[in-house]
Image (cartoon, rainbow, N blue to C red):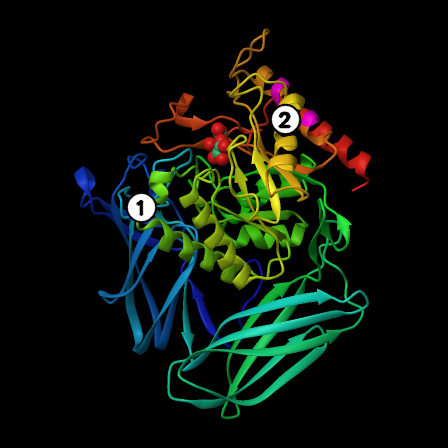
Amino acid sequence: MIRTFQTHCIRKQEELTERLWTFTALSGDKAGESFPVHTPSAWETYPGFGLYRGEGRYETNFSAGGNVRIECKGVSHTAKVYVDGKLIAEHYNAYTPFSAVVQGLSRGEHTLAIVADNRFSDISALHVPNDYMSYGGVTRPVAVEEVADVYLERVHVTPSFDGTHWHTSVDATIVNLAEERPVTLRISIAEKECVLSPQMLPEGESVLHAEFALEDVQIWSPETPKLYTVKAVLNVGGKEVDDLFERFGFREIKIEVKQILLNGEPLRIRGLCRHEDHPHFGCALPYEAMMHDLLLLKDLGANSVRTAHYPNDERFLDLCDELGILVWEENHARGLSLEQMQNPNFEPQAEQVTREMVLSHYNHPSIYIWGILNECASDSEFGKECYEKQFALIRSLDKTRPCSFASCKFKTDLCFGLPDVVSYNIYPKWYHDTPVDAYLNDLYTWVQTKTEGKGKPFLVTEIGAGGIYGYRTPYASKWSEEYQQKALSEQLTGVLSHPDCSGVYIWQFSDIRISEEWWGGRPRTMNNKGVVDEYRRPKLCYETVKRIFREDKEKFGK
Ligand code: ADA
């Protein structure tokens, strides 16, 4: 399943999931080993491939003809795509989708091969040895489509509220593979329809725009996650040639002084950071496992998830839309040093992943904020320039959502003039012993008195402590479940009782694998700060988090 809802009726689309592909290892000792696998999957989950870094080829057949569009939702981390042996696309970054069209393919059977590469080198500025795994493989779904000479690339819907009425503007991006021609676009939302009568479309990409005034709409909120479908249908020469359905919600995010407002009401965030990671699936969690994670998040009383540290699988975002879970979606970067940011590939690769994230996830009502560059060099002038450029890019693509970044630069951050929300990752009781209240007050006072973050909303985007599942001690030593429970309880209570804090994200939802090559030296080569372990077994702190979140919800009435 590529999305949780139908996206085409006219366009012929075949998902190449739930079937076997042939995997062949191409590097090192394993080169030549070949066997059937299903996709999406990460090769670290194939027996004997738990530590494989290199290239791997995935091959399958498909049957189609005409203009064939291959859509890959995610290949980790560098992809080369071949149809009948001919290279048709190259893409860097595991966490964003890409597509390519092969024109005029003869009707019949063809081969599709995707070569994935998960090696670290200077060429890769974002996938670096880190406190999470960069897996390898075709890790998100792939689909083959037949498209006409003119087809819909994407549809963006922007609802806005003027205090009395909702206005909806729709931007449809259309690709014309042939010479200039007239097209008619019909867009419908609920019972309303807007027909953009014949427009001359030049060769290449064009955007057509429509406006809707809709009465009596139902609001999207965590309590009432009402979704609407927009349907766009393209007509050329009196014939319907293509269509695209998208979902969106009527909701508005605003920043007012120190608060983030959702539909005019201050947001209170009770969230967890989550990596896409599971011992059985690597980063390629199937729908059922994603849903299970969301059930656990709901059971914990969380109303938000932070997609640390990269854009997530769209099916997960679809589920968040449906379940009313607010999402902090983040571009891809974690803890890059100044030197790593100065890699000449850093800026273009970061720009690409940011652009692809915003363009492909624009419609999700659950995404209330964009995050960038977690814990990078925001204490340097060069870093500041990078933050500035990336915020400018996001704002040029999306004027409806606030932006932020999670800083760990204690009283040295230079960038708080740039985001709409000031966010900090803090670890009192874990990386140092300063009491939570004292640490947070000190930091907050500094932000208010010494930085351009003064008067902006404030979020704590990480707190947490390591706890190894099953390691129990009566004296609550570090790494025990007892210690983690005690530390999280103090951290959560301290942060949530801060009068100017809009909420908190716990680091993290589940224990995760980290890259073997990373220097961190973590027990089990895992980040053990999960509230559940990697198999989703609750640790001692689970019930504590649940209680504190429930009490906070009762206090704030939402
Ligand atoms: C960070 C970082 C996380 C994780 C965490 C930790 O601040 O953003 O990715 O590494 O610390 O466990 O220390």
Q: Give the residue displayed 63% in from the left and 41% down from the top.
A: 295
Q: Is residue 121 magenta?
A: no
Q: Give the Cα separation between the discs numbered 2 and 1.
A: 34 Å
Q: Indicate which label's residue lies in the foreground, 2 or 1.
A: 2
Q: Earlier in the sequence, mark 2 or mark 1?
A: 1
Residue numbers of the magenta segment: 486-494
Q: Is residue 487 magenta?
A: yes
Q: Residue furthest top?
A: 475
Give the number of callouts.
2
Answer with left or right where residue 125 lies relative to residue 505: left
What's the magenta bit mostly, secondary-structure-wise? helix
Q: Give the residue displayed 55% in from the left and 25% down from the top.
A: 427
Secondary structure under tag 1 reads loop
Q: Nearer the viewer, residue 377 or 214?
A: 377
Answer with left or right where residue 106 lies relative to residue 174: left
Based on the displayed image, in which of its 4 quarters is residue 42 positioned?
Answer: top left
Residue 442: mark in rendering? 2
Residue type at numbered disc 1? Asn
Taking the image as drawn, is residue 227 in sight? yes
Q: Give the residue displayed 57% in from the left and 48% down from the top.
A: 419
Based on the displayed image, in which of its 4 quarters is residue 483 positioned?
Answer: top right
Rendered location of residue 233, percent (x, y): 56, 79
Residue type at numbered disc 2? Asp
